[in-house]
Amino acid sequence: MPTLIESRIQDRISSFAQELDVLVRKSALEALRGVLDSGASPARRVPGRPRSSPVSSLVEGVAPAIVAHVRANDGQTVGEIAKAVGAAPKAAKKAIKDLLDSGQLEKTGEKRGTRYHVGSGRKSKAR
């Protein structure tokens, strides 16, 4: 048998959930009215338009952090760099590739032994 306090807590939770439900429904209706009143239709992809890559947009913000991290921690792997800057491994790999191409980073080693270092700033030759 629930105590007086437990039943009061349960009543408040139930009341809050009902209020929240009403607010969410109102918000959804307002958003729907806004779309219907403006006469706008949702944007659609047209043939021939290139898809935007979520990774490419992340790369731009991650690259400066990667260079700063490698400057402070020379000889790190991709996994260590990605973890340190809080980036997805895929975004970190793409950013590192771009930084290697621009000469901001250099690498030593191969495969699992690859380590990254601050570069000279000169663009690398074709690999």
Image (cartoon, rainbow, N blue to C red):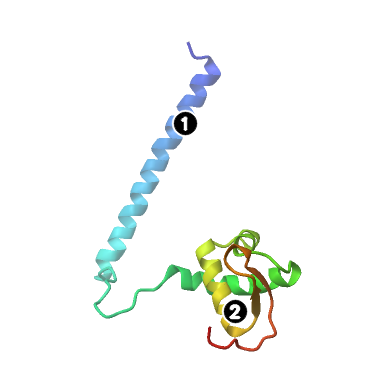
- Residue 20, position in %: x, y? 42, 42
In the image, 104 versus 29, the foreground residue is 104
The image shows residue 97, relative to residue 33, as above or below, that is: below
In the image, 49 versus 99, the foreground residue is 99
The quarter of the picture where residue 5 lies is top right
At a point 28% along the width and 68% down the height, the residue shown is 42
Report, in whole angstroms, how far the alpha carbon at label 1 lies from the one at label 2.
55 Å
**Relative to 45, is 1 on the left or the right?**
right
Label number found at residue 13: 1
Q: Amino acid at mark 1?
A: Ile
Quick one: label 1, few (<14), some, or many (20+) residues within 10 Å?
few
Quick one: label 2, few (<14), some, or many (20+) residues within 10 Å?
many
**Relative to 91, is 40 on the left or the right?**
left
- Residue 58, position in %: x, y? 51, 69
In the image, 11 versus 90, the foreground residue is 90
**Relative to 7, is 85 on the left or the right?**
right
At a point 52% along the width and 20% down the height, the residue shown is 6
Is label 1 in a helix, a strand or a loop? helix
The image shows residue 119, relative to residue 80, as above or below, that is: below
At a point 50% along the width and 65% down the height, the residue shown is 90
Label number found at residue 124: none
Q: Which residue was labeled with disc 2?
A: 100
Is label 2 in a helix, a strand or a loop? helix
At a point 64% along the width and 70% down the height, the residue shown is 109
**Relative to 85, is 51 on the left or the right?**
left
Q: Amino acid at mark 2?
A: Leu
N-terminal-most mark, 1 or 2 = 1
- Residue 94, position in %: x, y? 52, 72
